[in-house]
């Protein structure tokens, strides 16, 4: 009975260890590196959480219709190490951000470079792969 329990425990432990790797996605699976876009809008929400930050930007078209884009960025620790602190992203601030569109044609993307109102620029995510 004991060897069977140990084998089951080992198998269960292995599955729990590997499961987070299965949950993570690749850039190429979700985003199209050939569809780079530039969005200008107002930050409406910021999720500074692992495994990636999300910046929500309200973008107004020529007719005044607002679309909220959800843009994924680097992990918080990566941003902190490059000098990109969470207080740089303030709700209500206007930014221009380059991104790669999602393959599913939703209003989501992989954020790349942010230009702030004062002209400073920071990278929020990787170059298209």
Image (tube, helix red, strand yellow):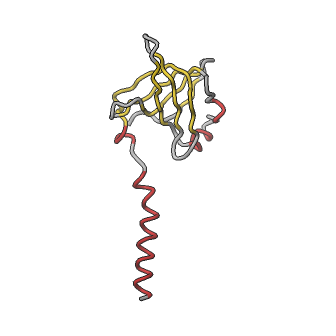
- Residue 5, picture quadrant: bottom left
Residue furthest right in the image? 87
In the picture provided, is 103 more to the left or to the right than 79? left
Q: Is residue 104 left or right of residue 8?
A: left
Q: Residue at x 42, y 32 (%)?
A: 108
Instruction: Measuring from the top left, give residue 29's x and y in whole percent.
Output: 34, 42
Residue at 44% in and 87% down? 2
**Quarter of the image that includes the N terminus:** bottom left
Q: Position of residue 27 (x, y in %)?
A: 39, 40
Identify the residue at image location x=41%, y=72%: 11
Q: Quadrant of residue 7?
A: bottom left
x, y (%) of residue 102? 37, 33
Residue 89 located left or right of residue 2: right
Which is more toward the observer, 119 or 65?
A: 65
47 relative to 120, above or below: below
**Camera-nearest residue between 33 and 5:** 5
Q: In which quarter of the view is residue 6 placed?
A: bottom left
Task: Work out which residue is located at the far top of the displayed protein and give it.
Answer: 62
């Amino acid at each position: 009975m004991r060897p069977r329990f140990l084998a089951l425990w080992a198998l269960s432990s292995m599955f729990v260890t590997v499961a987070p790797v299965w949950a993570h996605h690749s850039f190429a699976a979700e985003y199209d590196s050939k569809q780079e876009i530039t969005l200008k809008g107002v930050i409406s929400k910021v999720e500074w959480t692992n495994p990636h930050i999300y910046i929500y930007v309200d973008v107004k078209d020529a007719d005044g219709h607002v679309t909220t884009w959800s843009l994924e960025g680097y992990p918080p620790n990566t941003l902190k190490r490059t000098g990109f602190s969470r207080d740089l992203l303030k709700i209500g601030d206007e930014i221009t951000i380059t991104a790669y569109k999602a393959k599913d044609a939703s209003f989501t993307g992989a954020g790349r470079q942010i230009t702030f109102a004062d002209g400073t620029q920071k990278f929020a995510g990787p170059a298209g792969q």
